[in-house]
Image: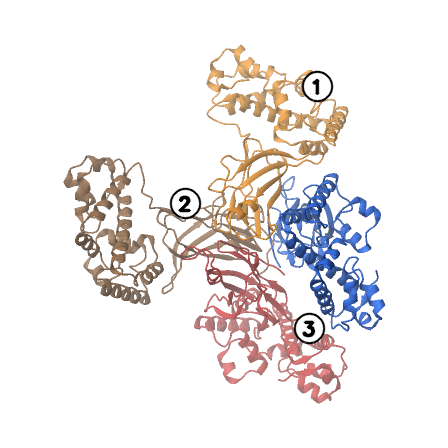
Chain colours: A blue, B orange, C brown, D red
């Protein structure tokens, strides 16, 4: 799925347009078909709104068919039979392709319970979630009635679509689908940004193993060259940031206890707004530290 | 081994005295015998110094015999054959009776490497240590020469003896063998001590599982009714204190994100001075926290 | 007015009792007279409650006379004519004997405005106040009706009486009339309590000059040997604690900028509960600091 | 003195060039004359280096004449007789036109002591200084020998020249003569940037009154729209930043004590690097705050 531009989409044939955007909504090219007639679009925002409106104004049966076109999450049989490339990548992004046994069981229970109550699959935009938050989201949604869940499902489908569109189409404007997670280490022992601190970002999991999301080293400004997470949603979930400060201070000949009072410092926090900017800094001496939710 | 008093020890027969203190130094009643003649003692400090001096002034062969009288650490065969009650309790205090396979292997290597180099067992006062710190201590001591290690061993044996004496004998004065680990939670959101926070103290282990040392709930003053560790040495090692702040703030109707930005806060730190007073407080709001080494 | 004991008061003649306690309530020995008949008292608390109840159950005219028996605050003419020793000491404690011209004018306005509205003097327990808080208290009370102010005045008179009683009479129990203001300096650069830090406590004033309340040097535990304020109420008001940290770090050969980023650190805060325990610590490195309301 | 561009200076006549830059070095057009012959300049940096080199390579007598061409600081007689526009603006920037009597006396002593020891005026780039730091700088320089002071004076003259050049000439490159002082208020009670906080930056003075440098209100990001000081050197000296947090929290219906524990928070700090970026943030709840030197 190579990227295209809005200008190309405005200029191409109707057939090419539908071919390009046919799977923005899973197995539902009729939405792209309707949008093809509304060209040209001034921006990707306008394009997305047109597609979203098509979904919202569609007859209920069509919306239900759209919902039912989605696969179950983490379903081994369906994955073996083959998902769309988009669904496959999305599920992999949340680690649904490498679950522990306990997690597989949990997802199977979730899918079955949901499907047997509502008659359609449990849908959530997994790029905005972690395994834990998906299961937590399910717990909250299962008690709902069917109308609420149809609406919620359509909302999640539109979030999935917005992210697919954002990946596929280049334009001057941007959909508001990206968040950012960043950090900053300030060495308040020397009064300077702490350079050269090794950092690990770990996604915590209630049922499975913790997973390293990314590793980085702080630069001369005490920051990481790239955000820890950027250019995509920051998945809702629980995390630990681990800062290797013991090595940092030892290398600077700072007098430490043995073993050092502080060595690897974990900051454990949750992400609740995938499209927000979350800054989790560390102010640190060999004997104290502080953190806060910054922006 | 019931407790006795210094007054009783000063007043009892020589035989009773030796019976009571014969195993303060492992399998070496000759030290108690020498001390018996030096009675009466003005305090437990004086008694201990007398016994220690006896060891230091003993002929080298006797000191070596004293060293060799000690068991290996975490040795299954010796434990099966039976340790002294004191050694057994000491090894259990550091968790040497419930090691992971990797830890057993590590201890076996340590014992063998040490014994084959020096010809006597590797001795350390395990009540002042965790499994990790024992292995770390070994790494540091193995390169030493035999004289250094004889001195080090005698030093550790005296530490063991001081702790045994402290447990056995009541007196007006105290040996300086106890440390203290305490905490304090200040809720800087409401400006008050945080009452009702569930706390867990966990001993971390490089080779085995983490181990819960104690659990407590903060009282109205934001402190725990008892020190987290008190009335004994605080074992050298790495720890995590986990504070359940999410529940605390949720119960106080404070507006939180979902999931809460902070829920279980781990403070990871090391203890380096078993006889010191270490205070690890938490200053916390739903969006920030700080800690420092206090006293 | 030398101190006496509750036992002596329980045992002495009625005349001696009234002579001793006649001015606990300003110029109103009838309250002591009533209390004399209720002897013996099990504690100073019981004695005070008896006197307070006598006031509360007295006819309105007598309570009004009690109110009118009090002097104006900071009134030069009355002071020249002579106050009771108690009133004089109380007013001096709040600095009412050394006001700036602007403050004298403010107090004169307050006294006149209050007296002309209510027909009796403006009364407040000045040992619990600063000049600023007295003027602020007045602003809040002036809009009240006369009944409210009679009640408020009696409440303040009882606070005055409790403090006089506490100073005069020794007993096993204590009236809850004392507060405490303390501090603690933790050097998070070295991970130790900061010893030898010069501290000044200053009372701020809106209309006059700031006033040094006390000076102290931190001891080996980073605390002051005595509370900054103790054994008396902590007057409601605004304060600055100034910590001389530049000199402290310079003497420890810590590398500093020139001039040092932090030298004299002022912590500005208000006291609102004179009988409370207020702890205002400083956590400090040469490049950062933090404080919080502790307890 | 209107601004010109480097392109214009490269293209204009020699006479125009000298007219434009004749007073970059006080009363010393010979430096501009030498630079005129070295045109064209690729940047303002190259232009400045050329002028600086001209000074450094000039015969000692000429350098001495350059030094002597400078006025005394804060000298009433010279100011009455008229300074160059540049000198006048520079001295005013440091407040030398509105000194207290004690300050005038101090500057007079400084000028006289310096001139009588060295035979030339005491020169310092006052745009990089406050009144206090000028007097402090003098104390440090007075013990020097004459050669050191000639060098120091030339160094200061070049700093003066660089700032004059930066103000006068627009170019693609910039001389590194500007610093920045910024702040940021994070409300860790609500976990958000604190918007609408009134801030005052005050320059402290040992001999005269404190002086408000600037006032600002924090924006939605908790920052000020403009740096507190920017586009110029941040003068060496002692400052207080005062944050009006009492009003901020009261307006947000946060439960406070009466009077509020924290109302106006002063952060007192020193600037030591006029060309550096100094960030002094405030992390604050109604009951706690922290600051640190950021970057």
Residue D20 image-quadrant placement: bottom right
Q: Position of residue D153 (x, y in %)?
A: 62, 72
Q: Chain of mark 2?
A: C
- Nearer to us of marks 2 and 1 is 1
Query: In the image, are marks 1 and 3 on the same chain?
Result: no
Q: Chain of mark 3?
A: D
**Mark on residue B78?**
1
Disc 1 from disc 3: Cα separation: 77 Å
Q: Position of residue C195 (x, y in %)?
A: 50, 46
Determine which residue is flagged by label 3. D175
**Mark on residue D102?**
none
> What is the quadrant of the N terminus of chain A in the image?
bottom right
Disc 2 from disc 3: Cα separation: 55 Å
Q: Is residue A226 visible?
A: no
Q: Is residue A165 visible?
A: yes
Q: Does dot 3 land on a helix, a strand or a loop?
A: loop
- Nearer to us of marks 1 and 3 is 1
Q: Position of residue D142 (x, y in %)?
A: 56, 67
**Total tally of numbered discs in the picture:** 3
Q: Does dot 2 land on a helix, a strand or a loop?
A: loop
Nearest the viewer among D217 and A75 is A75
Looking at the image, which residue is at 49% across and 54% down? C244
Q: Does dot 1 land on a helix, a strand or a loop?
A: helix
Disc 2 from disc 1: Cα separation: 57 Å
**Mark on residue C226?**
2
Nearest the viewer among A169 and C167 is A169
């Amino acid at each position: 799925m190579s990227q295209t531009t809005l200008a190309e989409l405005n200029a191409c044939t109707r057939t090419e347009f539908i071919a390009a955007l046919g799977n923005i909504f899973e197995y539902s090219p009729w939405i792209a078909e309707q949008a093809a007639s509304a060209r040209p679009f001034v921006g990707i925002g306008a394009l997305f709104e047109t597609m979203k409106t098509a979904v919202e104004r569609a007859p209920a049966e069509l919306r239900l068919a759209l919902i039912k076109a989605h696969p179950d999450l983490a379903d081994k049989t369906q994955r073996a039979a083959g998902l769309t490339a988009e669904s496959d990548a999305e599920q992999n992004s949340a680690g649904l392709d490498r679950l522990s046994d306990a997690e597989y069981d949990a997802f199977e229970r979730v899918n079955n319970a949901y499907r047997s109550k509502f008659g359609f699959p449990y849908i959530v935009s997994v790029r905005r979630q972690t395994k834990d938050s998906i299961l937590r989201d399910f717990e909250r949604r299962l008690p709902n009635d069917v109308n609420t869940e149809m609406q919620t499902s359509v909302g999640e489908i539109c979030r999935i679509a917005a992210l697919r569109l954002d990946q596929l189409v280049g334009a001057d404007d941007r959909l508001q689908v990206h968040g950012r997670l960043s950090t900053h280490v300030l060495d308040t022992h020397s009064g300077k940004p702490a350079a050269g601190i090794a950092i690990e970002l770990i996604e915590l999991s209630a049922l499975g193993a913790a997973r390293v999301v990314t590793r980085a080293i702080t630069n001369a400004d005490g920051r990481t060259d790239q955000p820890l997470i950027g250019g995509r949603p920051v998945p809702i979930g629980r995390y630990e940031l681990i800062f290797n400060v013991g090595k940092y201070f030892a290398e600077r000949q700072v007098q430490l206890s043995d073993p050092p009072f502080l060595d690897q410092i974990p900051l454990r926090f949750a992400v609740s707004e995938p499209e927000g900017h979350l800054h989790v800094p560390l102010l640190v001496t060999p004997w104290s530290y502080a953190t806060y939710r910054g922006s």
